[in-house]
Amino acid sequence: MPLSALAKQTPAAAEAKMPLPAPRIVAVQATPTIKAGPIDASYVQGLLRQRLTEALVNAISWVMRYKQAEIRSAGLFSPMLLAQVLVDMKFQQMDQLMSNSPPMDKILPHIVEAGEFLLKRKRSSIGEYLYPQIQSALTESAPFRAEVGFVGAHFNPGKITGMLLEDLEEAEQLCRPDMQGKLTERIMEACELLKEHFKAE
């Protein structure tokens, strides 16, 4: 058929008279079967820990709201931090306790225990920071202390650090760089108390 005649035909008619291409045979390769491997135990353990932590956060939040007098030390910390400590310290016990939807009184002693643990760790951390600061201040102020009678074995950094840690909230504030002047003031006040105490003896 001449090209001029083919051009006059409608697209449908032209398409109908066009020779069809020879069919091609394509070899189809079978897709390999994907076998599911074993579930990663650490991933499952992570999910369980996350869900247990979330459940504990809710339970601890409730206890902290209604049992404030019973959890004074625990009340210094967030429910999330307390929950993480309990999951780390006693995962199996907490998992069993929470799965049985316990009365909140059952979880109360565990919260108190976590609070005491965190409080001890916090006190230790603050003490470790303050001790060398106090030691340095005592060394630098030795001539002045000798003049005012702040001398003797009891004027040592360990004892003064312990005295400052009695008020943990203030001791934490004294760790800030902008509180060096206040720390020096508190050290001198502690020396005054030590002098009075040992004079009385």
Image (cartoon, rainbow, N blue to C red):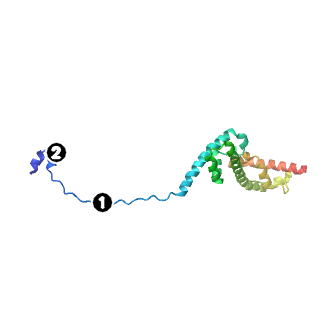
Tell me the residue that label 2 is attached to. 12
Residue type at mark 2? Ala
Indicate which disc residue 70 carries: none
Name the residue nearer the viewer: 115 or 155.
115
- Estimate the x, y position of residue 4 in percent, counting from the top left: 9, 48
Element marked by disc 1: loop
- Estimate the x, y position of residue 37 in percent, counting from the top left: 47, 59
Which numbered disc, 1 or 2, marks the residue that appears first in the sequence?
A: 2
**What is the distance, in whole Å, between disc 1 and disc 2 at their CAs?**
33 Å
Q: Residue furthest front?
A: 100
Query: Residue at coordinates 13% horizontally, 50% vertically from top-left?
Result: 17
Foreground disc of the pair 1, 2:
1
Residue type at mark 1? Val
Query: Residue at coordinates 79% horizontally, 50% vertically from top-left?
Result: 163
Label pair 1/2, CB-CB below 8 angstroms: no
- Estimate the x, y position of residue 79 in percent, counting from the top left: 64, 45
- Estimate the x, y position of residue 96 in percent, counting from the top left: 63, 50
Tell me the residue that label 1 is attached to. 28
